Amino acid sequence: MEQLVPALDTLFVLIGAVMVLAMHAGFAFLEVGTVRHKNQVNALVKIIADFAMSTIAYFFIGYYVAYQTGFFHSAHELATNNGFGLVKFFFLLTFAAAIPAIISGGIAERAKFHPQLAATFILVALVYPFFEGIAWNGNFGIQAAFESLFGAKFHDFAGSVVVHAMGGWIALGAVVLLGARYGRYNKQGKPMSAHPPSNIPFLALGAWTLTVGWFGFNVMSAQAVQGISGLVAINSLMAMVGGILAAIVLGKNDPGFVHNGPLAGLVAVCAGSDIMHPLGALFVGVIAAAIFVWAFTAAQNKWRIDDVLGVWPLHGLCGAWGGIAAGIFGLEAFGGMGGVSFMSQLAGTLLGIAIATIAGFAVYGILRKTVGLRLTQEEEYNGADLSIHKIKANPEL
C-alpha cells in the first residue's frame, strides 16, 4: 500500500493541474464574451500564447526562484516517486500562468501583442515567484518573522493573495499606464460609451469553466491524497453561491455581474478555504461580490480606470479581502480551525499588494518607454483581430 502513495499523490496533483489548465479556457471565453466582436480573436490568442510563454519562464527561471529547485537532472532522477515533482511543477505552473491571464482581461482591446508577451515572461520568471517563494516556501525568513511577531505564519492555502491579488494589482499598473480605450470618456472625464459585453453565452461559458475548474484549484492545493479535505470543497461551494446571490441583488440582475459573482466568492475563499466554517465562507463570498460590484462600477464611472473585465476589483480587491478574511473567519472564535493571526494575514496581504503594485508600474512603465504598450488609434478602431492577427472572428460575415 505504501508503494501506491506516491502514485496516488501524482495522479491527484495531475488531475488538479489539468482542472486548473482548463480554467485558462475559462479566462479566454470570459474575455471573448466581454470584449467587442472585433477583439475576440485577440482574446483567444493572448491567453494561449501567454500560457506558452509562462511555461518557458517558469520552467527555466521562475520555479527555481520560488523553490530553489529545477529540472537540470537526468530523466531517471526526475521520474523518482512516479514523477511527483514534475506534476507538482505542472500544477504550480497553472497558478503562475494565471497572472498574465488575469492581466489580459484588464488591458483588452488596445494592448500590443508582443510587449504583453515580454511582460508575461518577466512577471512569471521573476515577480510572481518572488512572492510565491516568500508565502509558500518560507524564503527570506519573512514567514518566520510573522510567526515570531504575531504568533502565526501568513496563511494562503490556495492563492487569494499569492495568485489573485498579485495578478489584480499588477494589472492595475498595466491598465493605468495603458490608458482608457478611445471614446470611452470625453474630455471632461465623463463616460461616453459603456461598451457592453458582445456575447453573454461566451461570457457565461467562461465563468462556468472557471467555476468548475476552481474546485481543482482549491481542493488539489493539498498536493497529497491524504490532505484531501471536504471542508475545502464545501467552503468553495458556499463562497461561490454567496457571491452569486449577492451579485444578483446588488448587480440588479445584470448578467455580467451575476456571472462574475461566483468568481469573486471563489477568489476570496482560496486563502482560508481549509480553515473556515462553511457559514464563514458564505459570508466571505457575499462580501466579495459586494466589493466587486461596487468597485467595478466606481472604477469605470468615477475613477476612469478602464479595466475591461474588472480584473483589479475581481482579483486584486477580492483577493486582498480573502487574505484578510482568513485571519477573521479562520479563527476559532468565528467557528474556524484556528492557527492563524489577523495581523499576519494583514501584513502578508499588504506585502503582496506592495510587491505587485510596484512591479506592475515598473514592468509596464519600462515597456511603455521602450517598445510602447498600446495600439494606434486607427488600429484600435479597426480592432485587435484585424490589426494584429489579420482575421475576424467570423470572416464570412
Image: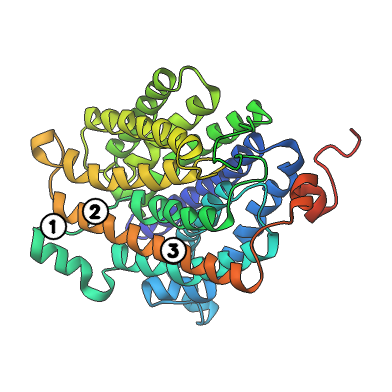
Could you tell me which residue is drawn at 58 percent across and 56 percent down?
178
Residue 231 found in image quarter: top left
Q: Amino acid at mark 1?
A: Ala
Cα–Cα gap, marks 2 and 1: 8 Å
Residue that protrudes farthest toward the right in the picture: 396
In front here: 100 or 355?
Answer: 355
Q: Amino acid at mark 3?
A: Phe
Q: Which residue is mark 3?
A: 84
Q: Element at badge 3?
A: helix
In front here: 236 or 88?
Answer: 236
User: Horizontally, is 64 left or right of 189 in the view?
Assistant: left
Query: Against 230, is 246 above or below?
Result: above
Image disc number at residue 152 = 1
In front here: 297 or 217?
Answer: 297
Q: Position of residue 292 (x, y in %)?
A: 41, 35
The mark nearer the N terminus, 1 or 3, is 3
Residue 35 visible: yes
Q: Are marks 3 and 2 in contact (CB under 8 Å)?
A: no
Query: Against 57, is 274 above or below?
Result: above
Give the number of the mark in front: 3 or 2.
2
In front here: 59 or 239?
Answer: 239
Could you tell me which residue is drawn at 35 percent across and 65 percent down?
131
Q: Position of residue 191 (x, y in %)?
A: 57, 34
Q: Amino acid at mark 2?
A: His
Within 10 angstroms of label 1, few (less than 14), some, or many (20 or more) residues?
Answer: many
Cα–Cα gap, marks 3 and 2: 24 Å
The mark nearer the N terminus, 3 or 2, is 3
Within 10 angstroms of label 3, few (less than 14), some, or many (20 or more) residues?
Answer: many
Q: Element at badge 2?
A: loop
Q: Are marks 2 and 1 in contact (CB under 8 Å)?
A: yes
Q: Which residue is mark 2?
A: 155
Query: Against 200, is 349 above or below?
Result: below
